[in-house]
Image (spheres, rainbow, N blue to C red):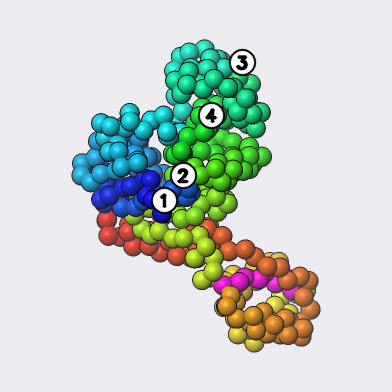
């Protein structure tokens, strides 16, 4: 599979431990790649390097094997970009801005632009300077998607969006992925990465912690079930005999979560047989999410990273 985006040993040192240090990853054609990190971890700095806005201290990055620094003009019309901070030029209304973008991209047929405006429910007659944060974000998304680019670089794309608009964005990303578009998305919202990404990189304090394949961690961490008991007494009695890994226990609501080996169907049958001896309100399958993986695996790496920097 062809590598469209390449980042090799990318370093930008702002001093006092701030910046990015030795980032190394690539994004394949038609893939959705996510970057997760807290504020100040280096997400925006990485994306700005790829767009050619920053010069690295060392290392390199490229799109379509075109070096981002000094030569990004060669791929700009093939790349849709939503920055982390929206700052529109003073050109009047949202409609005025989108027309300028369409002219730049050479778009004659406005049908798709109008479809995007409808998806995000934008009043394009509003002045750019008077738009709310959410409306500015939606206008920026339309501008990025309108040319049906081959590559999308999205920095916290759902900032300011309500849950319905966030779902619309996720559907749009998946639709464009089917078309063959390659995505690099930074976000701190796990759901949008869970629903879209093939691989996710976790970063902290400007350092690359780990890259995971979504399909891989879902399979390896087993099946999880939330079990609600009639009383604490029932739950505690179950815990005394329970042979499975307990992920969490909620004494207030008398429920717990257990993890079973996903490769052993017998474990599920054993759990059901064991629960037959207890008064149970419900048993529910709990999908394993990216947030689960982060809390159980990455937080420990972040703590070690903080200690090493200190």
Residue 42: x, y in percent?
35, 45
Residue for badge 2:
182
The quadrant of the rendering that contains the N terminus is: bottom left
Q: Main secondary structure of the magenta part?
A: strand
Q: Nearer the viewer, residue 102 or 164?
A: 102
Q: Secondary structure at mark 1?
A: strand
Cβ atoms at labels 3 and 4 below 8 Å apart: no
Label 1 vs 3, first from the N-terminus: 1
Residue at horizontal 25 percent and vertical 50 percent from the top: 9
Mark 4 lies on residue: 146
Q: Would you say residue 91 sits in the magenta stretch?
A: no
| Residue at the image position 45 percent from the left and 54 percent from the top | 200
Q: Which residues fall within the magenta stretch? A: 222-229
Say if the magenta span includes residue 226: yes
The residue wearing badge 1 is 28
Which residue is labeled 3 in the image? 125
Q: Are marks 1 and 2 in contact (CB under 8 Å)?
A: yes
């Amino acid at each position: 599979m062809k590598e469209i985006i390449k980042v090799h040993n990318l370093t930008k040192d702002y001093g006092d431990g701030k910046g990015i240090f030795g980032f190394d990853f690539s994004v394949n054609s038609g893939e959705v790649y996510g970057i997760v990190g807290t504020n100040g971890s280096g997400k925006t700095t990485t994306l700005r390097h790829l767009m050619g806005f920053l010069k690295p201290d060392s290392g390199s990055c490229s799109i379509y094997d075109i070096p981002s620094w000094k030569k990004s003009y060669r791929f700009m019309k093939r790349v849709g970009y939503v920055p982390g901070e929206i700052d529109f030029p003073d050109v009047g209304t949202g409609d005025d801005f989108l027309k300028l973008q369409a002219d730049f991209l050479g778009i004659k047929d406005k049908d798709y632009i109008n479809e995007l405006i409808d998806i995000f429910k934008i009043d394009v007659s509003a002045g750019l300077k008077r738009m709310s944060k959410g409306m500015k974000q939606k206008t920026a998304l339309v501008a990025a998607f309108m040319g049906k680019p081959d590559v999308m670089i999205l920095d916290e794309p759902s900032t300011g969006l309500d849950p319905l608009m966030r779902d619309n964005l996720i559907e749009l990303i998946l639709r464009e992925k089917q078309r063959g578009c390659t995505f690099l998305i930074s976000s701190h919202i796990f759901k949008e990465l869970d629903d879209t990404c093939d691989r996710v990189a976790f970063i902290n304090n400007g350092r690359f912690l780990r890259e995971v394949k979504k399909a891989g961690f879902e399979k390896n961490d087993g099946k999880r079930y939330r079990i609600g008991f009639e009383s604490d007494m029932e739950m505690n009695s179950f815990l005394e005999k329970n042979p499975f890994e307990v992920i969490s226990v909620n004494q207030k609501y008398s429920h717990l979560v257990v993890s079973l080996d996903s490769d052993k169907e017998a474990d599920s049958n054993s759990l059901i047989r064991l629960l037959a001896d207890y008064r149970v309100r419900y048993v529910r399958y709990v999908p394993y999410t990216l947030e689960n993986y982060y809390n159980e695996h990455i937080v420990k790496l972040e703590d070690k990273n903080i200690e090493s920097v200190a």
